[in-house]
Image (cartoon, rainbow, N blue to C red):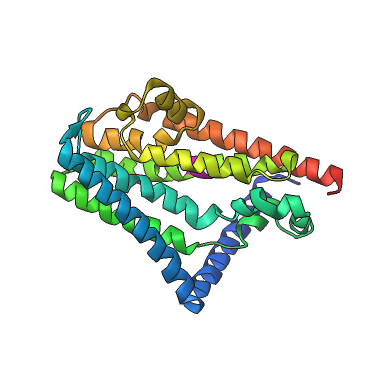
Amino acid sequence: MKGSPPTAIASLTRYLKLTIFFGGVGLHRLTAYRLDFMLGAGSFFVRVGTQAAVLMFIFRQVPVIEGWGYRQTLFLFGFSLIPRGLDHLFTDQLWEVGRKLVLTGDFHRYLIRPLGPLFGVLSERFLYPDGFGELLVGVAITGYAGHRLGLHLSPGQLLLLPLLILSGALIYAGIKLLLASAAFWTTTSMPAMAATYQASDFAAYPLEIYGTAVRRLLTWVLPFAFTSYAPVSYLLYGRTHLLVWTPLVVVVVLLLAAAAWSRGVRRYEMSGT
């Protein structure tokens, strides 16, 4: 029977095998086009290095900002790159949906493949080179800052850490999918996607330095605070006032994104674009 547990498990297993396969294709691409990887990762290193240098300069002038010192802020900055890099590795092909696939009508080719349209889009290119750069630099900066802080996580924090990173990556992916889906109504949603991801850069710094409007925007409208500030506040200071909302935020973002994508795909099919 359609939708029965054996069928669902078989389908999940199939997609898992395909993910591993396309991930292998992505790794092969990296080895075949090493210059592409080096340019992508290298440009990211320059950008992050510049941001870290600016942080150092600021905290040389002002040692503490709203209770956050240089090492704490550096830890937050580094941690913010990890879930973003994880998302970058697997879902950045969604940018093509917002940029041109609906506009040019090329999205139709995903509707005739024996795969779900979303997986079809994502599988075009797993393992983006820039994503590796974000992950490596994020882990390095977070580890360095944590060492300088003398940070020792409790067993509970260590257990939650992978879930916090995964939650952040899912929030990034959900917001990206939601914005990309808008292209089914507007033909292109690239400006909105670009503006939103520029706003996500603010989540790499303590929310306390922003005004009330910006804090609410980053927490409840574009919930990037749950990708970095909320988990880091818990890891460094044991604060849980935002952390407890993280599962609900993840579920709401993913449900909204899934609904928008599903309706958008149906609209595209009905319009015959």
Measuring from the top left, give residue 245's x and y in whole percent. Answer: 42, 27
Q: How many labels, in total?
A: 0
For residue 16, what is the image quadrant? bottom right
Q: Which residues are magenta?
A: 170-174
Kindly identify the residue that appears in the image at 27 percent across and 56 percent down. Answer: 140
Q: Nearer the viewer, residue 241 or 2?
A: 241
Q: Position of residue 56 (x, y in %)?
A: 21, 46
Residue 178 is situated, as x and y percent measured from the top left of the image, at 61, 39
Measured along the vertical axis of the image, is residue 39 above or below residue 156? below
Q: Residue furthest bottom?
A: 32
Residue 68 in view here: yes
Where residue 252 sits, quadrant-wise, is: top right
Secondary structure of the magenta portion, mostly?
helix
- Residue, x 37% and y 50% (percent of image)? 82
Q: Is 1 on the left-hand or right-hand side of 148?
A: right
Q: Is residue 139 above or below residue 28?
A: above
User: What residue appears at the point 52 percent right and 39 percent down from the top-left corner?
Assistant: 196
Residue 92, x across and y down, in percent? 55, 54
Query: Position of 171 compared to 243: left or right?
Result: right
* Rendered position, 222 above or below 119: above
Viewer-proximal residue, 111 or 131?
A: 131
The reply to whether residue 116 is in sight is: no
Which of the 4 quarters of the picture holds residue 177?
Answer: top right
Task: Name the residue at the top extreme.
Answer: 212
Check if residue 161 falls in the magenta segment: no
Which residue lies at the image location 30% right of the left edge and 48% below the top edge? 78
Position of 78 relative to 250 (above/below)? below
